[in-house]
Amino acid sequence: MSRRLWAMAATIASAVTLAAAGPAAADKIKHPIAVFSGLDKITGRIISFEAAIDETVQFGSLQITPRVCYSRPPTEAPRTDVFAEVDEVEENKHTHRIFTGWMFADSPGMHGIEHPVYDIWLTDCKGGTQIIHEAPAVADAPPPDAGDADAAGAAGAANPANPTPAPTQPPKRRKPKPPPLPADVGASPLDLGQQAAPAPGRAP
């Protein structure tokens, strides 16, 4: 396969992988302060308050502690989110966790705070200038070298994955052994075509 075809195949594969993985994570700005709004459902009163990262602020019987607060640079799509923990203070002064997770300023209804009297949602993050650069989700892989592909093809042809077995030849039939020779094997064979000469003797 030529280098151009390898490059085209690698480009298509990278595009499919990026489409499956979704868009790469954008850069974000880390802030030291999260801004919330709190609602008293009985009186209908809404107040705005701030909480520093890892600082616990109480609204009504709820205590909220932000852990991280991010916004996006002006070049990115607007998005502001905070990871927070919300506890409820009971009458016996004990607390129990009612929410842990992300809150989104542009989608306040996505978080899962469920309380009959109070509600809290994120409105902004502020005070930060530190930009956190996110690595792309998938790195483009360089196309394989054409020489390596040819060598791999030649190796595959020389050593196929499923080699065809060589045809087996039928077993050879053994020749029968000749019978054993007689004891006088060293004697000359008789010549029946000649008559034996008379024994020498005197003439009559």
Image (spheres, helix red, strand yellow):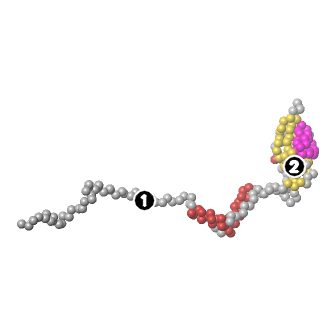
Nearest the viewer among 104 and 20 is: 20
The image position of residue 24, as x and y in percent, is 78, 57
Nearest the viewer among 175 and 138 is: 175
**Residue at 36% of width from left, 57% of height from top?**
173
In the current view of this chain or complex, which residue is farthest to the left? 204
**Residue at 74% of width from left, 58% of height from top?**
18
Q: Quadrant of the N terminus?
A: bottom right
| Kind of residue at badge 1 | Gln
Numbered mark located on residue 152 in the image: none
Q: Quadrant of the C terminus?
A: bottom left
Q: Nearer the viewer, mark 1 or mark 2?
A: 1
Nearest the viewer among 34 and 161 is: 161
Apparent side of residue 145 relative to residue 122 in the rendered image (left or right): left
Residue bearing the label numbered 1 = 169
The image position of residue 9, as x and y in percent, is 68, 64
Nearest the viewer among 105 and 14 is: 14
**Residue at 34% of width from left, 58% of height from top?**
175
Start and end of the magenta stretch? 45-66
The image position of residue 191, as x and y in percent, is 20, 64
In the current view of this chain or complex, which residue is farthest to the top? 92
Residue bearing the label numbered 2 = 69
Element assignment for label 2: strand
Q: CA distance from mark 1 to mark 2?
A: 80 Å
| Nearest to N terminus: mark 1 or mark 2 | 2
Element assignment for label 1: loop
Q: Residues within 10 Å of mark 1 (few under 14, many from 20)?
A: few
**Residue at 92% of width from left, 42% of height from top?**
45
